């Protein structure tokens, strides 16, 4: 016999049925019934109390990005819901699977400007893959199953479930069935064999093929398939920022990062190759720069699961719509085994030039202040290049992704498409919960850290072993860089007078120290990594450091700045 | 830049709350003005059909339609130009009965424009005309210039493709097949 339970309990049972074990959230009037029920489910559902709802979504993102599971956030109506918007938008543009559950006023009050009522669906429609309001307890199980199915399949993304209070308290017969079909939604498009054949033919005939690796590879779990594809035909590759760690840094065909602050080789070769193969990436303007001069010489093959991305920014010669885990091996099977020694070696002179003009100075300075790059690379190596890198946004982010090294997939958690300052600290919390066995290193800036610094409280409460490296330059560094390079050193609103971050950490019971001498750096890193628990290392770096190389916004590879 | 043309976007969707909003925000983001819009249940119960016209270049309309198509509750979205379609709009004209009768060319008007009289009482006459935009507009112009129009309303465009394939049923058949395959797959597991 079926037993009647409350909508709130049905919600929790549905989450458990979807394999959820961790929820990031913040309570309030419109979700109290759910929180009350949660009290009885503590063993099965770990609830992490963040200090601001924005951080519930960012933490859920961090969790999802490292684990590949759907991240879950639970918040109240009104301001609780509006506080989640930045995280939802961030997850949308970075294709991160989230289910965000917002409480809502009781359904008879909807549309009456009731206390803490807000049109959550209306507000979140443009930034979600799906948003649905539940007004009856009977709809909860159905809506949750659809939410998880939609969030996690096809091109993943955030889903919002807005659950009215009467649906939370009403009684319902609970029965759960996981969704695996929605008539109007086809997550995996059918693969067209003609596209596969055309792609293989182009690549086999190519003299200088080059592959662009995006996060789609990681989302599809197609890292191995990609490695085989590249290896068989000896195709060099560059990764987008979010595609980093799909290939190990030291994999010989991995030529580095693409884009504005990416490596010289991959950016130059994009405009020299004869066939450009894009896998699970969307030709963002931070990757392409000026589209009118981007890869004009090349035939373009685009593999993606999202039809609306193919041809959106760059005209495509061969479209390969489908899941990369399936399409890549189909193409690989038709590829000739090749060695392209000369073409692959051509990347070396670019790498050498970049090393001499940029990298060497950043990693091995002999005097002056600490440099971001040297701190980052030293920490990466001290973790045997096995840690998860989380970054905030700004110079710390670009330096982080440039100089951290990766051995395994899902090792980079950073806000790509939205570039959300304040993302780092909460995302690191989620990353640690999603990959508890891995070392999690967050690199953040003095600006970004202060946008969500209250999350030190969450770290304290959960005793989460997160390593926080504050690259303190007392500037909104990345904006300052633009002001120096393009606005005649007019530092409008980028100078920061900062608090004593070490004391702040200590107030939260988080071990912390400051480092500014090069001689002390190794020892400080050692202390941080050896410490059993959270740690904040404040590295006082050069105030006016610059991230190079830089292809200015909207410019082309020939306009590259190397700081020489 | 490609040339801007009038495109008709035809969308089949589930009949869920907020769908129109989902569709219109995609037009808004691209700064496209919706010229006409018509929504109604389709031949298949539970499925709604939107017919939207907008001026755009082909490159833009293709992207917009793909983004609409991608929304979870949308079954399918297409775009067409006028050559591919049979389309129609309907217009209603309210006139003063006195002036209408005094005009003295009622028969001529009805023959020339193929109008129907829907209502006639002591104060007003309501005429109906269906046709393309130009046709309903020409009648409006003529009436305005002669006896004056008290009220005028025109519907959004409705359209049917000239091609022999019925896209909606094809699409649904395809969906049924996917579902069946899924069931057989699950059966095997
Ligand atoms: C929420 C938000 N506001 C503003 C910006 C614009 N912005 C990009 S980088 C940056 C400076 C970041 O300064 P800091 O956190 O100190 O990092 P740094 O660049 O110095 O490493 C700013 C203001 C942003 N990306 N996100
Ligand atoms: Mg800074």
Image (cartoon, grey):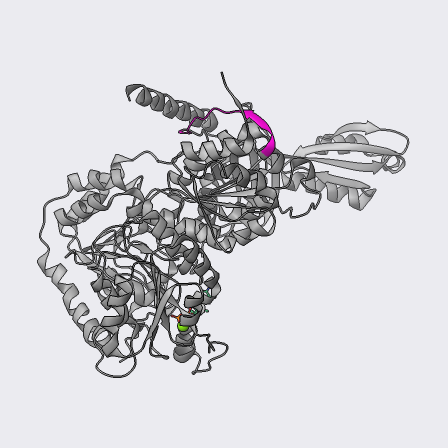
The overriding secondary structure of the stretch rendered in magenta is: loop
Front residue of A448/A433: it is A433
A510 to B84, vertically: above or below: below
Is A170 inside the magenta-drawn segment?
yes
Within the magenta stretch, is there residue B1?
A: no
Which stretch appears magenta? A169-180
Q: Nearer the viewer, residue A99 or A208?
A: A99
Q: Find ligand 1 in the image and state its quadrant.
A: bottom left
Can you see residue B139?
A: yes
Residue A154: x and y in percent read: 37, 39
Image quadrant where residue A245 sits:
bottom left
Residue A71 x/y as whole percent: 41, 45
In the rendered image, residue A472, in percent from the top left (x then y), is placed at 38, 73
Residue at point 33%, 69% (across, down): A551
Q: Is residue B74 visible?
A: no
- Compare residues B14 and B170 and report the one nearer the observer: B14
Q: Would residue A66 appear left or right of B33 to someone viewing this image?
A: left
Is the residue B74 above or below the residue A281 in the image?
above
Q: Which quarter shows the C terminus of chain A?
A: bottom left
């Amino acid at each position: 016999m079926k037993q009647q339970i409350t909508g709130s309990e049905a919600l929790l049972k549905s989450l458990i049925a979807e394999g959820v074990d961790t929820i990031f959230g913040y309570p309030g009037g419109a979700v109290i019934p759910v929180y009350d029920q949660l009290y009885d489910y503590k063993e099965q559902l770990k609830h992490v109390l963040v200090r601001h709802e924005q951080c519930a979504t960012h933490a859920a993102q961090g969790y999802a990005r490292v684990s590949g599971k759907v991240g879950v956030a639970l918040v109240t109506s009104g301001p609780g819901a509006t506080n989640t918007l930045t995280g939802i938008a961030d997850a949308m543009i970075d294709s991160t699977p989230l289910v965000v559950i917002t409480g809502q006023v009781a359904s008879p009050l909807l549309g009456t400007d009731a206390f803490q009522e807000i049109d959550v669906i209306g507000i979140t429609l443009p930034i979600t893959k799906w948003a649905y309001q539940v007004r009856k307890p009977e709809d909860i199980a159905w809506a949750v199953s659809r939410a998880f199915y939609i969030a996690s399949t096809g091109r993943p993304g955030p889903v919002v479930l807005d659950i009215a209070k009467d649906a939370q308290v009403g009684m319902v017969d609970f029965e759960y069935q996981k969704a695996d079909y929605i008539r109007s939604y086809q997550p995996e498009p059918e693969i067209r064999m003609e596209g596969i054949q055309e792609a293989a033919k182009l690549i086999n005939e190519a003299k200088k093929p080059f592959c662009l690796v995006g996060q789609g590879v990681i989302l599809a779990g197609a890292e191995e398939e990609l490695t085989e594809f590249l290896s068989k035909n000896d195709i060099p590759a560059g990764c987008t920022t979010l595609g980093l760690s799909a290939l190990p840094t030291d994999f010989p065909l991995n030529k580095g990062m693409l884009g504005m602050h990416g490596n010289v080789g991959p950016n130059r070769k994009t405009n020299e190759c004869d066939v450009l193969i894009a896998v699970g990436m969307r030709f963002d303007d931070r990757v392409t720069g000026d589209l009118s001069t981007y890869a004009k010489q090349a035939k373009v093959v685009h593999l993606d699961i999202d039809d609306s991305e193919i041809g959106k920014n760059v005209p495509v010669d061969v479209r390969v719509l489908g899941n990369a885990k399936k399409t890549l091996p189909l193409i690989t099977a038709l590829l000739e085994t090749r060695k392209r020694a000369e073409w692959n070696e051509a990347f070396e002179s670019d790498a050498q030039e970049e090393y001499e003009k940029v990298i060497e100075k950043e990693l091995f300075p002999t005097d002056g202040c600490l440099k971001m790059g040297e701190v980052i690379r030293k920490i990466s190596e001290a973790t045997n290049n096995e840690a998860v890198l989380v970054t905030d946004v700004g110079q710390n982010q670009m330096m982080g992704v440039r100089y951290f090294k990766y051995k395994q997939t899902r090792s980079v958690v950073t806000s790509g498409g939205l570039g959300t300052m304040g993302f780092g600290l909460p995302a690191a919390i989620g990353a640690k919960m999603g990959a508890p066995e891995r070392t999690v290193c967050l690199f953040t800036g003095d600006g970004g850290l202060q946008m969500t610094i209250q999350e030190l409280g969450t770290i304290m409460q959960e005793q989460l072993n997160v390593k926080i490296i504050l690259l303190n330059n007392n500037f909104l560094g990345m904006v300052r860089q633009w002001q120096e390079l393009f606005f005649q050193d007019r530092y409008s609103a980028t100078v920061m007078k900062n608090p004593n971050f070490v004391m702040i950490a200590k107030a939260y019971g988080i071990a912390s120290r400051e480092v500014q001498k090069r001689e002390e750096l190794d020892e400080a890193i050692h202390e941080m990594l050896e410490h059993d628990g959270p740690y904040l290392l404040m590295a006082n770096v050069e105030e006016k450091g610059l991230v190079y190389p830089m292809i200015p916004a909207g410019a082309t590879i020939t306009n590259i700045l190397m700081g020489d | 830049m490609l040339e801007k043309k009038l495109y008709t976007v035809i969308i089949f969707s589930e009949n869920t709350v907020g769908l129109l909003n989902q569709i219109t925000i995609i037009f808004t983001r691209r700064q496209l003005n919706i010229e006409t819009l018509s929504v109604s249940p389709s031949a298949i119960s539970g499925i709604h059909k939107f017919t939207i016209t907008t001026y755009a270049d082909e490159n833009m309309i293709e992207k917009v339609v793909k983004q609409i198509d991608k929304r979870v509750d949308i079954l399918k979205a297409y775009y067409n130009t006028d050559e591919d379609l049979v389309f129609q709009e309907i217009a209603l004209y309210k006139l003063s009965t006195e002036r209408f009768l005094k005009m003295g060319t009622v028969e001529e008007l009805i023959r020339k424009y193929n109008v129907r009289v829907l209502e006639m009482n002591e104060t007003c006459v309501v005429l109906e005309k269906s046709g393309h935009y130009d046709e309903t507009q020409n009648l409006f112009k003529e009436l305005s210039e002669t006896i004056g129009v008290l009220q005028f309303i025109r519907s959004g465009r409705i359209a049917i493709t000239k091609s022999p394939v019925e896209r909606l049923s094809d699409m649904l058949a395809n969906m049924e097949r996917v579902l069946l395959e899924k069931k057989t797959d699950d059966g095997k597991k």
